Structure formats: C-alpha cells, structure tokens
Image: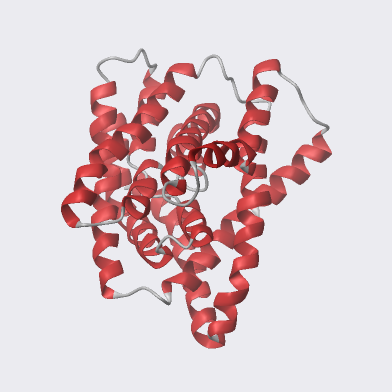
Amino acid sequence: MEIFNRIVSIILPVFLIVAVGYAYARLRGEIVKQDIGSINRASVELLCPLLLFSALAAKEFDLVANLPLMLAGALIGLGSGLIAWPVARLLGYDLRTFLPPMMYNNCGNMGLPLAVLAFGSAALSEAVALFMAGSLVYFTVGMRLMESGRTGGRKAKLNLFANPMMVAMIAGMVFAAFKFSLPDALMRALRLLGEASIPLMLLALGVRMSDVTMRSWRIGLVGAVVCPLSGLAVAWLLDFVLPLTSLQRGQMYLFAGLPPAVFCFMVAERYKQEPEQVAAIVMLGNLASLGFVPLALWLGM
C-alpha cells in the first residue's frame, strides 16, 4: 500500500498539470493551440536535450557498471515495437502513430523519481542508464520510423545525427565515459532548464487533449495496455538470459511497466503525425500506470 501511495503521489500532479492545460485551452480557444507550437519547439530542441544531458553527465552515473542494464532497456524498447507492429496492422493504425509511443516509455519524468522512491537514492544511476537506453532506441529506430515517407533516406540519416536529443545523448555519454565534469553552478543551471521541460510538456499535452475524439480514445486504450504488457513480456524473457544484479532486475521490470512518454506527443505534434491520437495514448497510458507500475514492481521484487 505504501508503494501504491507513492506512485499516486507522483502520477497525481501529472494529471493536475494536464487538466490545467486542458482548461486553459478551453477557456482561451484556438489562440492557445496556435501558440503552444513555440513551447513545444523549445522543449524538443532545448529543454529535453538538457534534461537528458544533465542526467548522463551527473557524477553518480556509472556507465560501465550499467552496460547490461542498458542492453536490457534497448531490447525492451525494440521488443515492444516488434510486438506492437502486428497489433497496429490488425487494427488499421498508422505505424508512425502507434509504434513510437510503444517503444519509448516515460522513463524520464516518471521513471527516475519512481526508481528513487522504490529502490532508494542509490538506484538513480541504474534509472539514468535505462533512460539513456530508451532514448537511444527512440531517437534511432523510432525517429527513422517517424521520418519514413517524409524525406529521402540520406536526408533522414543526416537529420538523425543533427537531432538535439541525439547530440545531447552523445555528449552525455562522452562525459560519463571519460568522467568529465562541469562546474557545479553550470550543472545546476542545465538541470533546472531540463527539468522545466516536464511541466511544459504536460501543459502542452493538456492543450492537445481538447481535440481528442472518440476514435482517439479507442487507440488510446489499446496503447495504454499494449505498451506496458509488451515491455513486461520482453523483460520476463530477458530475466532468464541477462546477468543482472537484484537491483538492476527490479529496475528493469519497473522500466518495462512504465506508460508511453509524454515526449512522444511532442514529436507527433511537431511532425503533424495525428497528435490528438498520440495524446490519447499518452494520457490513458499514464492513467493505466496506476495498475501496471505496481505489477511491474511486484515482478521485479
């Protein structure tokens, strides 16, 4: 019961911020939906990359010790996409809409605090490793999928390595591998800027929820179930083959049971890839996490 109360205490503010965005869009009308694009652009191109970089470049992150866990995180993301592929085909969903949220879960703004609450502050390094692995899969395979049908192969590859999240990830891994460090004041500033992306993303999600239709709710329900179940299925298989410590094993299951990431909505909005449907997947997925996250913790413990 205690861990359930902790989960609620993390998830409830998420829905309150989304509700504020929804109410604001309803009150102010179309002008808010037009202006939110600038906020989304700043989040995708500046704030979210800083969140990822500051997590990887933190002194407590141990790159070498967490290589098996990073492999697990990458395989969970890829495996979830493979499981979701036939589901999308069967139900007639656009693969560019449905698959990316299945491959990239809320391992940042939900996974990091949940890991600390469930396993203690010593677990932060493992949570950051999974955050990096999930981001790596999304910004390689996921973004290639999102680019398909929009640009040529050569341009898509160039866009991949020019992506601010990829640049931040590579820079963060270099800092982690060679134990580079920035002045404490600068790191605090970067971390504050990165953390600002979390409420802004949730606010933008609430604004987009004002456009959700009944068709969006149906795909949202499917995504809310497929994302954690596919992740947990892959984690269960990996449990038999990967040499993980008990702490890493618990972290792997927690990661696998997380809902779709809010960032997937931001990218869908930017690409005009049915953002109202992705918003429904994210919103209902985070609501369903009240059931799936305790299940993941039970499996991991």
Q: Which quadrant of the view contains residue 246?
A: top left
Asked if residue 139 lies left or right of residue 281, the reply is: right
Residue 106 image offset from top left, x and y in percent: 44, 46
Q: Nearer the viewer, residue 112 or 275?
A: 275
Q: Position of residue 282 (x, y in %)?
A: 39, 57
Name of the residue lying farthest toward the left: 90
Note whether residue 301 is visible: no
Q: Nearer the viewer, residue 178 or 167?
A: 167
Residue 189 drawn above or below residue 221:
above
Q: Is residue 41 above or below residue 226?
A: below
Looking at the picture, how far across and down is residue 212, in whole percent?
A: 36, 73
Q: Nearer the viewer, residue 76 or 291?
A: 76
Quadrant containing the C terminus in the rendered view: top left
Question: As drawn, is 220 to the left or to the right of 9?
Answer: left
Colour convention: secondary structure
Numbered label tally: 0
Residue 246 shows in this picture: yes
Q: Position of residue 250 (x, y in %)?
A: 36, 28
Q: Is residue 290 left or right of residue 29?
A: left
Q: Residue at x 58, y 76 (%)?
A: 34
The residue sitting at 51% across, 43% down in the picture is 108
